[in-house]
Image (cartoon, rainbow, N blue to C red):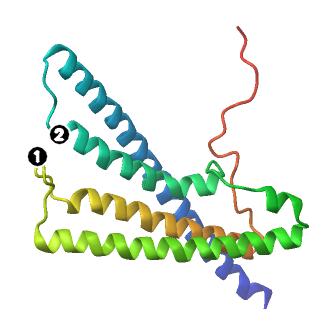
Amino acid sequence: MAGSLGPAMSSMDAFLNLIDRSSRLLEGVAVFMLFGFGALMLGEVFARGLLSQSLPFSWEYSTFAMAGVFLLASGRAIRTATHVRVSLVLEAAPASVARVVDILANIAGLIIVAVLVAALYNAFSTSLARGLVSATIVATPLAIPQGIILIGAVQLWFDLLARLIRLMSDRPAEDRGADAVSEEPLDV
């Protein structure tokens, strides 16, 4: 019996590892988009200050980038416990109660994000089918930024699923040291 659990556990570990790796990849994309957003804003400041005109695409693309950054990086924030979370109840409650509350909150999060994914998919598929574009001079096909945002929401759902699996199987749900900066003092 114990031997039959081994492959199932390794399959589950592989699944969780795949979610972690895809989350890390999308985190990298989010960082790239964040730098791109910063470059766009610097370009806008330069264009307005020195050329006395605005870049026609900077505000639109920056808005799309910020929405993408938010959702592309949110799943990784869940795994590394860098998201904002009110843990007052969890810290005050006994461990068994805190675990149940954490699991229930995670299930609620899965449901909410599933609704978000459905809404984003509806917007994406409508924009794609109708060829909708932004109402600016740039006329960006809306399916492109909506698709990026949808990918981030799907990844967030998978990260919440992975967290629930970890909570229910007594695996560490958070990897607090994954992105930690060394706390050793620097020699100056």
Q: Is residue 161 visible to the viewer in this orientation of the structure?
A: no
**Residues under numbered marks 2 and 1 in contact, where contact means CB atoms less than 8 Å apart:** yes
The N terminus sits in image quarter:
bottom right
Q: Is residue 116 left or right of residue 158?
A: left
Residue corresponding to mark 1: 138
Label 2 – label 1 distance at C-alpha: 6 Å
Residue at horizontal 55%, vertical 59%?
A: 20
Disc 1 marks which amino acid? Val
Q: Is residue 80 left or right of residue 39?
A: right
The label shown at residue 181 is none
Q: As displayed, is residue 74 above or below residue 43?
A: below
Residue corresponding to mark 2: 57
- Indicate the position of residue 8 as horizontal and vertical percent values: 65, 82
Residue at horizontal 80%, vertical 70%?
A: 99
Mark 1 element type? loop
Q: Is residue 166 left or right of residue 18?
A: right
The C terminus sits in image quarter:
top right
- Within 10 angstroms of label 1, few (less than 14), some, or many (20 or more) residues? few
- Indicate the position of residue 5 as horizontal and vertical percent values: 72, 84
Disc 2 marks which amino acid? Phe
Q: Which quadrant holds residue 186?
A: top right
Mark 2 element type? loop
Residue at horizontal 81%, vertical 62%?
A: 90
Residue at horizontal 51%, vertical 55%?
A: 74
Q: As displayed, is residue 51 above or below residue 150?
A: above
Q: Report the residue that reaches farthest toward the bottom.
A: 1
Query: Front-most of 30 and 25?
Result: 30
